[in-house]
Amino acid sequence: METTAPTLAEIMAFVSASPGAEEQSGTTSRPTTKRESVNDLLDETKAAAVLGDVKPGTLSVWRSTGRYKIPYIKIGRRVRYRRGDLLAWLESRTRANGATA
């Protein structure tokens, strides 16, 4: 049985149903508020799940090579992502036609 990657609408519906999703505003350059905490940030595994058919190691490669500019937060050696930043990045990659540029 062949599996397909989830659509953006399916990902958004999943994220909206996740605990704490109502706290995410979707902006990329906002400071952490009192309602947000380090516990609300996503590790690579959870961030990869939000992005769909992406492996956690792929996020590491994208960060180190600069291939995609997905905002992330460094806390010591750990890397964390805001759910809203991931969704904004996905939205920025949405294309209305077959153009690749």
Image (cartoon, rainbow, N blue to C red):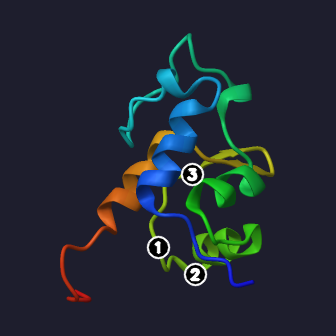
92 relative to 20 in the view: left or right: left
> Which quadrant holds the C terminus?
bottom left
| Viewer-proximal residue among 39 and 94 | 94
The answer to whether any part of residue 86 appears in the image is: no
Q: Are marks 2 and 3 in contact (CB under 8 Å)?
A: no
> Which quadrant holds the N terminus?
bottom right
Local SS, label 2: helix
Q: Seen from this angle, which residue lies furthest top?
A: 34
* Mark 2 vs 3, N-terminal side: 2
Q: Amino acid at mark 2?
A: Thr
Q: Amino acid at mark 1?
A: Tyr
The residue where tag 1 is placed is: 68
In the rendered structure, find residue 65 and report the number of the disc placed on it.
2
Percent across and percent down for residue 35 are: 56, 12
Q: How far separated are the C-alphas under marks 1 and 2? A: 8 Å
Local SS, label 1: loop
Please name the residue shown 66% across and 28% down the image.
Answer: 40
Please name the residue shown 74% across and 48% down the image.
Answer: 43
The answer to whether any part of residue 38 appears in the image is: yes
The residue where tag 3 is placed is: 72
In the rendered structure, find residue 20 and report the number of the disc placed on it.
none
Please name the residue shown 58% across and 20% down the image.
Answer: 36
Residue 74 lies, with reference to residue 68, above or below; the image says: above
Residue 46 lies, with reference to residue 55, above or below; the image says: above
Say few, some or many: other residues with alpha carbon within 10 Å of mark 2 (under 14 / 14 to 19 / 20 or more). Answer: few
